[in-house]
Image: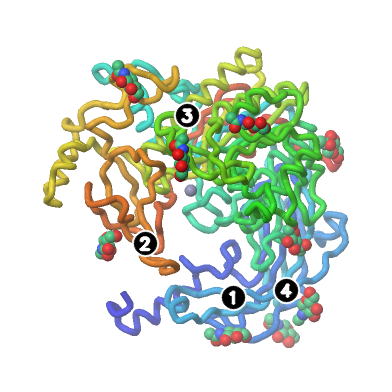
Amino acid sequence: MKSQYPIAFAAALLTSAVSAQTFQRLGTCPTLGCVFPPDQADFLAGQFFDVRLEVHAPQNGSEAIGLPPDESFTFTIAKGDEEGVPAAEYFQIDEPKLENWTFSWFEDLFAKDAKTPSVVDVRAKAYRRVALYEAGEYTATLTYNNGSTTKATWLVRDLEEERKTKNIVLFIGDGMTTNMITAARLIGHKTINGKYQSKMQLDQFPVLGHQMTHSIDSFITDSANSASALYTGHKSTVNCLGVYADSSKDPFDDPKVETIAELFHRLTGGHVGIVSTAYIADATPAALTAHTRDRSQYPHVIDSFLNGNTNYTWTNWTGPDVLFGGGAENFYPSALGGETYKDRDYYLEFADKGYQVIWNKTALDAASTSERALGIFTVSNMAKWLDRNVYKTNLNQSLSPSGDETPALDQPGLKEMTLKALEILHERSGDKGFFLMSEAASIDKMMHVLDYDRALGELLELDDTVKATINQLKEWGCDKETLVLVTADHGHGFDVMGSVDTAYLAAQNVDRKKRSAVGTYQNSGLSQYINTGNLTYTDSNFPSNWDPRYTLFQGLMADPDRRETWTVRKHGPREPAVETEEDSDDYVVNPEDGEGGILLNGTLPVSNDQGVHSLTDVPVFAVGPCQEKFGGVYSSIDIFFGMAECFGLARGKAE
Ligand SMILES: *[C@@H]1O[C@H](CO)[C@@H](O)[C@H](O)[C@H]1NC(C)=O
Ligand SMILES: *[C@@H]1O[C@H](CO)[C@@H](O)[C@H](O)[C@H]1NC(C)=O
Ligand SMILES: *[C@@H]1O[C@H](CO)[C@@H](O)[C@H](O)[C@H]1NC(C)=O
Ligand SMILES: *[C@@H]1O[C@H](CO)[C@@H](O)[C@H](O)[C@H]1NC(C)=O
Ligand SMILES: *[C@@H]1O[C@H](CO)[C@@H](O)[C@H](O)[C@H]1NC(C)=O
Ligand SMILES: *[C@@H]1O[C@H](CO)[C@@H](O)[C@H](O)[C@H]1NC(C)=O
Ligand SMILES: *[C@@H]1O[C@H](CO)[C@@H](O)[C@H](O)[C@H]1NC(C)=O
Ligand SMILES: *[C@@H]1O[C@H](CO)[C@@H](O)[C@H](O)[C@H]1NC(C)=O
Ligand SMILES: *[C@@H]1O[C@H](CO)[C@@H](O)[C@H](O)[C@H]1NC(C)=O
Ligand SMILES: [Zn+2]
């Protein structure tokens, strides 16, 4: 690519990089003086947060100033038109100590190829665990370098303080888009002459909203910062859990923001449940209690579920009532091949705090509903619906949650975990109420590996779980006091464009002829997944035939090299691309996929072995008290403010 451009043009690219598109010195800080939370941040009255200030002195690169950073910067807070007050005085805390560090970054791809990072010298301060209690606009002003200023306008939203719902159940279909719901409906529900004969549970919600998912400093999000936005009302940077990203190396010193789980527990004593089909240290569950700039700090995440934040005094978190999912490797110590915080046995840590420790579906079914429960059912991500129900021999892998390398054959699904979680929370929370987050994690994980069938199976399982939840709440008479939300954290560029005659495709040898197997418009025909009326697996709406001759012509917009046959993978989740040799960062079509189907070259950089997230807005479904707050088009952070307002958590006074 370099050689296509004249030298002058390449040089222009280099200098314009300072205004940072792809490579940024620090995402939310375009100037040399940084305030976190940054400009435009919204807060819940009384929500704890940390303030981080940084003053940067680039030592080289296009911004080099050749001076040490200013150490006498000042910081004030002003409410409305009032005079600014020094922050320590405003928050009534001691002036924090001055910190220093350096960090380096690449200005663009050319600098990266040439391995010439630019170094920045930093002076910083952190005001820990502060809050703003009065609604209105505030101006936070950092003054540095002899009179330069960075101003952040902060808004404490004016919300109703009255509690409108006793409980909230928040379902997150990780990576779930409207297109995926439409495809799942097509394979799970029958039509006659264009009319669906049954509806998904999601199709029956009275209120539908539409949320914008982007990160604070990039328009594509990952699941860490998108979950943080949903839970804290603060957008953040890729890989961040409940913090804004500062420039220091320590992944635990970044400025934190309090989450809905922490607030609900601290202010009302309400009970919290966390359920996911991922390894439980994964981003979507982790963002409820962990505060780190690096989502891959799994041992720390597991400790945070039990003990709250480990570094700084934060909240009076005392652990969830329910924690169900996979990821056993972060519970048993290194002697068994695990990786845990301080090499402790977290099964014992949880048991010592009164948790029932559960390792399989049989024990889950039998568990007491009056005691707290930790249920960890496998190493890594949980088995997919399709493997638990249809291709069961795929469960025969060395994934036992005990760490003894036997198979984890008796795994529950999202529905069994969620219903048990509801029973425990219902019984234990009494009149304090509960907050349950339940994540269908593998919609995302299976879309990443282009395993569309497994992804849609997970989505149908989510729908089935939502249906069972609503029925259970009605049975208890709790539906009028429980807000049920179903949303996603981001999407993938997935859609269905027609059908594929897999028999015809398999019979072709000439590449260009293979494409005739695709049927578009009138040749797309009708869904072949549901028409036997033979629901062997469950009484709900799942396909009776996952392997019809005419399948869906489906795919993503962003892929690695892959071989498409558009047939269900019977031997377990798909692995579309593999590395040519170890550490080469060069991924090609998985040779195990043979010679059938169509070889399609990827669109992503060759270092990708999977698809990636996309820009699309995602749907929000709401039913229950307060449902009306979730209609319309809004930002992901409004989910937090909506939930916090329904729970009556906006507290206009100091504790
Ligand atoms: C940086 O901080 C360390 C302590 O963390 C201190 O010893 C050192 O003097 C500081 N350096 C500068 C240049 O302020
Ligand atoms: C930038 O500065 C650092 C330290 O001052 C130095 O180690 C590094 O070599 C410099 N890089 C370039 C590209 O000049
Ligand atoms: C600030 O002013 C002092 C005194 O004039 C000077 O020494 C220093 O270099 C200035 N700093 C910056 C960042 O401009
Ligand atoms: C947390 O502390 C607040 C007061 O600071 C109290 O009202 C609340 O009940 C406590 N929650 C728990 C679970 O201890
Ligand atoms: C914060 O906690 C982590 C793990 O809990 C630890 O590794 C790290 O050193 C701590 N950082 C500070 C600044 O205390
Ligand atoms: C389930 O776990 C219990 C221990 O909690 C164990 O005794 C039992 O054998 C397990 N059952 C299956 C089917 O794995
Ligand atoms: C599970 O796999 C092992 C080896 O991979 C094999 O020996 C065993 O027969 C399998 N068990 C079942 C029930 O398929
Ligand atoms: C129903 O589905 C099962 C499982 O795929 C299959 O074995 C059986 O033959 C089917 N029955 C009919 C009537 O289609
Ligand atoms: C297309 O994919 C094949 C298999 O992964 C790979 O060997 C080949 O280099 C790719 N071609 C291009 C242009 O990327
Ligand atoms: Zn993802």
State yes or no: Cβ of the residue under disc 4 lies below 8 Å from any atom of ligand 1.
yes
**Nearer the N terminus, badge 4 or badge 3?**
4
Q: Rate crowding at label 2 as few (under 14), some (14 to 19) or many (20 or more) other CA atoms within 10 Å.
A: many
Q: Residue at x 26, y 26 (%)?
A: 528
User: Which residue type does callout 3 highlight?
Assistant: Glu
* Disc 4, SS: strand
Q: Nearer the viewer, residue 253 or 145?
A: 253
Q: Quadrant of residue 356?
A: top right
Q: Quadrant of the N terminus?
A: bottom left
Disc 4 and disc 2: Cα gap in Å? Answer: 41 Å
Q: Residues within 10 Å of mark 1 (few under 14, many from 20)?
A: some
- Tag shown at residue 104: 1
Position of residue 597 measured from the top left corner of the image (x, y, whole percent):
22, 47
The residues bearing labels 3 and 2 have C-alpha atoms spaced at a distance of 32 Å
Relative horizontal placement of residue 373, taking residue 615 as reference (left or right): right
Q: Which-is-in-front pick, marks 4 and 3?
A: 3
Q: Is mark 1 within 8 Å of ligand 2?
A: yes
The residue beneath circle 3 is 461
Give the CA separation, mark 1 to mark 4: 14 Å
The reply to whether dot 3 and dot 2 touch (C-beta < 8 Å) is no
Instruction: Report helix, strand or loop for mark 3.
Output: helix
Observer-side mark, 1 or 4, equals 1
Residue plotted at (45% across, 68% down): 583
Q: List the residue tagged with mark 2.
A: 587
Marks 1 and 2 in Cβ contact (< 8 Å): no
